Amino acid sequence: MRPEVLYPLFKTLGALKGVGPKLEITLTRLAGPHVVDLLWHLPSGHVDRTYEPKVAEAEPGRVATLTVRVVQHVAPPNRHRPYRILCHDDTGTLVLTFFHAHTDYLLKTLPEGELRVVSGLVERYGDEVQMTHPDHVVKIEEKAEVLRFAPLYPLTYGLTQKVLGKAVHGALECVPYLTEWHGESTLKKYRWPTWKEAVLAAHNPENPDAISPHAPARERLAYDELLANQLALALVRRGMRRAKGLATKGDGRLRAKVMDALPFTLTGSQEMALKEILHDMETDVRMLRLLQGDVGSGKTVVALLAALAAVETGGQAVIMAPTEILARQHLKTIEPLAQAAGVNTAILTGREKGRARAAILEGLVSGGIHIAVGTHALFQDDVIFHALKLAVIDEQHKFGVHQRLELAGKGDAVDVLVMTATPIPRTLMLTAYGDMDVSRLLDKPAGRQPVDTRVLPASKLGSIAEGVQRKLDEGARVYWVCPLVEENETLDLAAATDRFEQLKGMFGQDTVGLVHGRMKGKDKDQVMADFQAGRISVLVATTVIEVGVDVPEATVMVVEHAERFGLAQLHQLRGRIGRGSEKSTCLLVYSAPLGEIAQKRLKILRETEDGFVIAEEDLKLRGAGELLGTRQSGLPEFRMADLEAHADFLSMASDDAKMVLQSDAELNTERGQALRTLLYLFERDAAIKFLRSG
Ligand code: ADP
Ligand code: MG
């Protein structure tokens, strides 16, 4: 249960004074639904309002805070001219101008004859000193509130600094004092304020340095977040390890049969990874291992061999994929090999319903099915296994920690192998997986040809299509990728459909297929199967093919609007070709104008196919937070921490978390309790259930 002291922070934004339903929607879109989310919305700049000249000396182009007496309101002759208010001090006249003015309001806030403090951008027209729509107009007693460094927040459409500033102010008034969770020596060493002071200071920058990620207040909040992240991961990991694992030591007979049936031999790193995995499975410590390998590095066969080891001991294994297409693809790879060894497989996705589903559930309970491949559908409560020993989770970055755990809960102490094609740099690895064990597939299967990558403007689409036609004449199979982003889904879908129709006209009605995320599963499969079997030779696709689809015969890929994709995404996409022994070509087609970053991205892709190099370059171009397109990646999104600026704090947080759990395993001490609050504060409370007294 969330500690009571945090209740005010987890109210919805509508609970703040002055935040009505409309503003609540805007703020929620900008920052998040709760009061605490506004606290995490830190200023990205500041404005110096400490410049306090006399009117005559006020430099144009600077923000100034001026104390003046209101002399006269001058209403405009027509609606197109501004309302003017003349003010003065002992050096000269200041003209305040307002367009579309609310006269009543101005008469009230700037009554003639009164002294007022106004702050805003100084302009000069001839001899006249002007200020258009001053940011602040206050009485002389309130001058101190204006005359300072003021935060400037990132805004969204329909929001002004003033309105947002007020809402944040309201949120700051809810900030409770929280018992300290950091050791005193740490606070001293880094000169960090208390949590409450840090939040207040971060929102009230008193000088330009206060905006820097290295300002003590910001650093502290970032470290808080990293510690919450690392502590949560450490708890989850410990929870999974605590349960004694299974000692799964197969005799190798099924693996031997499958190895015989494989048309290739394993690469050195496949052998190595398999050895590490089998070793984990054999010990009674629960396995929690990440298998990291670039697209096409051959992870699936490693997973299958590990699954067979489980089956050899009378157990079962599941292989989970993030999409139905992928699950079916895995089944297709695995099924014939498994059959060669007399091992039964089945697939369970959202599409298996009624009797078919019941039959599969029955096979899983009885143990008749040895290896189950599937999607989220495998999480459902009525899916019960006879003896689940290994869970393989493919393309893990599409799943959250929660789901990983749910699946692992399907069997006692199930060994977990997570597979990812995302070349995650070490720093990010720590945030996503804590100190999980890692096996890497570094070498690609033999016989791969480098992909010839070219970057072309959309104006060349005509000759691109001609080139594709020539390839088709030679018997090639072609991916034609159109982007589809959530925000533009309808428009993008229309564009993809248009392209599909057009290409059908060009290459032949029966030659081209279309597959996209909104299609029914069955229809998708049909198209994919047609493409795989060569019944169609051009596949127009939105990014559903992005992960894992394997059609070795495909040798050409056209990516439209390549500038809209991230580096990692393009790399994944391109990984779909160059899988067979034929030479492959990837055409990255961009629509002008091409921004500088997009240009660099495409250049990198043209120059290298090394996933790690690409990831590093991406990190440089975008900064860590965005590296994997966080929203898609399922990697934790950090609000306070900037993984570049605070990189050193990450390993410190990791060590800190370990040390805490060593001395206070259940977080029962006073500091432990404070740390629980920290977990709730950063909404990492899913980890709390791993505490005995959680
Ligand atoms: P990914 O790591 O992207 O999941 P896959 O497991 O889909 O890669 O493998 C890509 C392709 O490489 C498949 O067609 C697979 O059969 C093939 N493959 C896997 N291992 C080897 C190997 N050692 N030698 C040759 N081909 C291999
Ligand atoms: Mg794969």
Image (tube, rainbow, N blue to C red):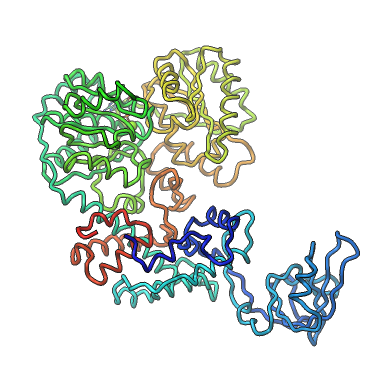
Using residue 279 as the reference point, say whether residue 130 is left or right of it: right
| Near-viewer residue (22 or 143) | 22
Indicate the quadrant containing the N terminus: top left, top right, bottom left or bottom right: bottom left
Residue 128 occupies quadrant:
bottom right
Residue found farthest to the bottom: 90
Residue 261 occupies quadrant:
top left
Ligand 2 location (quadrant): top left
What residue do we see at 20% from left, 66% from top?
664
Q: Tell me where residue 566 appears, x and y as whole percent.
A: 49, 42
Judge whether 370 appears above or below 506 on screen.
below
Using residue 608 as the reference point, say whether residue 331 is left or right of it: left
Residue found farthest to the right: 77
Judge whether 652 appears above or below 361 on screen.
below
Judge whether 27 appears above or below 573 on screen.
below
What residue do we see at 22% from left, 67% from top?
668
Q: Tell me where residue 551 appears, x and y as whole percent.
A: 38, 22
Judge whether 473 appears above or below 296 on screen.
above
| Near-viewer residue (211 or 6) | 6
| Near-viewer residue (320 or 426) | 320
What residue do we see at 21% from left, 32% from top?
317
**How many labels, in total?**
0
| Near-viewer residue (69 or 673) | 673
Residue 117 occupies quadrant:
bottom right
Indicate the quadrant containing the C terminus: top left, top right, bottom left or bottom right: bottom left
Using residue 225 as the reference point, say whether residue 264 is left or right of it: left
Q: Tell me where residue 685 appears, x and y as whole percent.
A: 32, 57
